[in-house]
Image (cartoon, helix red, strand yellow):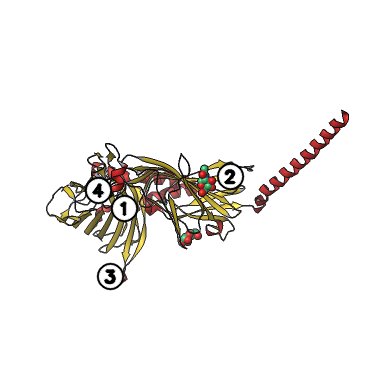
Amino acid sequence: MQVVENIGRTVEDEVAMDTLLKPRLALVFSILAHVFFLAFASSQDLQILNAEKRIDLTSHIVKVFLTLKVENTGTLPASELLLAFSPTEFDRLSLVKAAIATGKKKKRSYVPLDVKPIELLDAPNGAKGFSISLLNPLSPGATATFEILYISTHTLKPFPEEISQSESQLVFYHDTAFILSPYHIKQQSTFFKTPSTKVESFTKLEPTNRAGKEIRYGPYEDRAPYSFSPILLHFENNYPFSVVEELVREVEISHWGSIQITEHYKLAHAGARHKGVFSRVEYQSKPSLSGVSSFRHLLARLPPRIHSVYYRDEIGNISSSHLRKDFQKSDLEFEPRYPLFGGWKATFVIGYGLPLQDFLFESPDGRRYLNFTFGCPLAETVVDKLTLKVVLPEGSTSPTAVVPFEVEQHLEKKYSYLDVVGRTVVVLEKKNVVPEHNSHFQVYYSFNPIFMLAEPLMLVSAFFFFFVACVAYLHVDLSISKMQ
Ligand SMILES: *[C@@H]1O[C@H](CO)[C@@H](O)[C@H](O)[C@H]1NC(C)=O
Ligand SMILES: *[C@@H]1O[C@H](CO)[C@@H](O)[C@H](O)[C@H]1NC(C)=O
């Protein structure tokens, strides 16, 4: 299906080139290219000599590090490597990154590779996949080592689903003992790292070993493509399950010297639901025993040189915040009005100002651009839905956003005091955001400096008309009194 779509697109592109002969030639070429591409990328000719999967279950964001040593056993160079996921796992993925190792042991370095989702043809059980494009095709007989990181959210299921204030939180985690892969794997092991040594149970599939906070499955030898063996782990995890169900960050640029940021949070504790009554006395007197999976301290990591910080909720200002600044960052520590237990929510707003010159630059082509961080400033937090709005100064035109990963984009208009034509707002939306998404993005736009004068001119003319009106009024007034 992918192939058919691609051909369709190429044909359309070529038709647009408007000569008569070209489209047909292009069609023939593109079909040939695709046939060649298919042969080139045939997945059956790769095999995995050694695979190691390490799953970090210490927080509520599950991180998987996969090391694959791949050999090309075919007769043609291979230009891509495929990864397979079960459909549920695929839906919870927040990020997939891949790199290829180059150089020998001590001088080893990693070159990042492009990863994109693809349809896995003939994969059993609806498995879905990603394709990693190799910079240089892997020639027949050659081997290469890949490092893959993927992160998933909402994968740890609290069980029991409800706990009281004095209980600690237990969770389930489902996975497979054999690494799901479209390739034959000669040798493999899987390691799980749990937050504590308190493990209630785990599926055993010989050889399985548990030592301290680590559970190891394997080594297993010679598993056919798409081998699968479900396993279940049940263990203690009291990490704060902090999830922002919705975050709207508004970044407003004013060419008069500052950037104003307003962040609206809908924060929830996504762990086991709290049952029974909440005793504040018990909570405060025995913090190590009571409400161990709850949280109250929040930390927002904000840029340096921040000013006019506020923190408020529906009721009003909250004073329990503390700001520490150094030349690299500003740490804002704050507390909601009450500690958050499983299922509880808190809604609040954080606002602050930043100096314009730290974030707004001019590009070589004369356009201006904002260089700012994407993601959520709260530490170790999942954002189910993030909306980032960049409000450009009035009179800005043709904005373009450059984001290092896929986001949904559209434009809006915003009117504030003294605006005549309104401000263009670049809206970026992304679901399932994790701290690894806190990378820089840019919004480029053109701006005519004449617009800088619009607001002062309007103020001046407003005062002028006010003055004229006063004078007129006084004159009218006088003439009336004369008449009497
Ligand atoms: C809230 O705090 C901000 C900043 O500290 C202050 O400017 C504002 O007046 C306060 N508002 C209320 C209602 O106390
Ligand atoms: C954006 O800022 C970061 C951090 O200061 C910097 O590393 C990066 O090069 C900047 N990007 C652009 C396009 O200016």
**Upstream in sequence: badge 3 or badge 1:** 3
* Dot in front, 2 or 4: 4
Structural distance between the alpha carbons of marks 3 and 2: 54 Å
Q: Nearer the viewer, residue 448 or 272?
A: 272
Q: Secondary structure at mark 1?
A: strand
Locate residue 444, reporting x and y percent. Answer: 54, 53
Q: Amino acid at mark 1?
A: Tyr
Nearest to N terminus: mark 3 or mark 2: 3
Secondary structure under badge 4? Answer: loop
Q: Which residue is the site of mark 2?
A: 423
- The first of marks 1 and 2 along the sequence is 1
Q: CA distance from mark 3 to mark 1?
A: 24 Å
- Label 1 lies in ligand 2 vicinity (Cβ under 8 Å): no
| Residue type marked 4 | Leu
Q: Is label 3 or label 4 in front?
A: 4
Query: Residue 277 has which mark?
Result: none
- x and y percentages locating residue 251 in the rendered image: 51, 49
Cβ atoms at labels 3 and 4 below 8 Å apart? no
Q: Residue furthest left?
A: 206
Q: Which residue is mark 1?
A: 150
Given residues 314 and 81, the one toward you in this image is 314
Identified by mark 3, the residue type is: Lys
Residue carrying label 4: 289
Q: CA distance from mark 1 to mark 2?
A: 38 Å
- Answer yes or no: do the residues labelled 1 and 2 have beta carbons within 8 Å? no
Which callout, 3 or 2, points to the residue nearer the camera? 2
Q: Which residue is mark 3?
A: 105
Residue 438: x percent and y percent? Answer: 41, 54
Contact flag, marks 1 and 4 (Cβ < 8 Å): no
Query: Which badge, 1 or 4, comes first in the chain's sequence?
Result: 1
Residue 17 visible from this viewpoint? no
